[in-house]
Amino acid sequence: MRTPHAPTGPQVASRPRSTSAPSGAGPATTKGAPGVHSEPTPTGVRARSQHQRRKRIVQAAAALASRGGVEAMQMRTVAERAGVALGTLYRYFPSKMDLVVAVVGEEIDLLEGSIERRPPGAATPWGRAADVLMRATRGLMREPELADALIRSLINAEVDTPFGDRMTGLLLRVAGHGLSAETATEEQRALAGALASVWVHELMGMLRGHRTHEQTQRHIEIVAVRLLADFPTPPST
């Protein structure tokens, strides 16, 4: 996982690490009739190429961080591993922190994909929230160096990150029976955000050896019950 946006049960999908494919050439242009400006390659093709190149870069950065922390994410090394020119890397990510934020985003994408495939089955809002946070904990703790690097970098970040907002939004959806940042009240958003912040604190404790998995789960459950007691529950069927 990249405020801030793990327990047995469904696990967060593993991140692919294949990043050796070289980047393709830039988009071609087509000349039109005299006096007509040339047109770029169709947007869909260009967008797919850019998306694939960006994904290779992010995966390369995550693979390096998982072995040596943020210090291992040297921009030149990332570019070489991703098979892109250094200038290309800087066009996508002007700084290392921008790259860290992108790796965080991929972690949340993996978590959201896991939740979509296997929604939490608890009957209570706090039970569903705790389930999601512990899944995230499991996923991150499989690569503790990466998790520690991301958490430390985000705490010291000099750029805005989407981590807190995305984790808050995810908790609202799963705990609030379809709530979103737009439909939730200010109080509900604050409570979900507070729970996400407690989770990050507990995760840091685990990474430093101050918490066991069981202690973290118990603390998350206690806080979730208190914070989400008034969240809506699904109608009885």
Image (cartoon, helix red, strand yellow):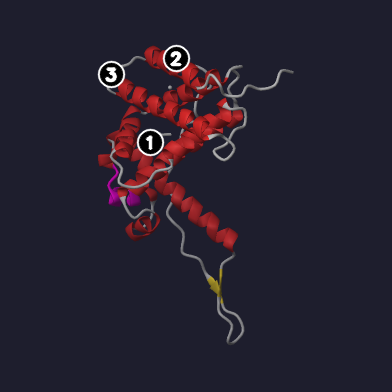
Q: Is residue 144 left or right of residue 137?
A: left
Callout 3 crowding tier (Cα within 10 Å): few <14, some 14–19, many ≥20: few
The stretch drawn in magenta includes residue 90: no
Give the x, y percent position of residue 93. 37, 53
Of pointers 3 and 2, the one earlier in the residue sequence: 3
Nearest the viewer among 160 and 18 is 160
Of badges 3 and 2, the one in the foreground is 2
Disc 3/disc 2 C-alpha distance (Å)? 21 Å
Report the predominant secondary structure element of the magenta stretch.
Answer: helix
Asked if 110 appears above or below 233 in the picture, the reply is: below
* Mark 3 or 1, nearer chain start: 1
Distance, label 1 to label 2, CA atoms, is 21 Å
Q: Mark 1 highlights which residue?
A: 3
3 vs 1, front mark: 1
Local SS, label 2 = helix
Q: On residue 222, which mark appears?
A: 2
Q: Which mark is residue 209?
A: 3
Element type at mark 1: loop
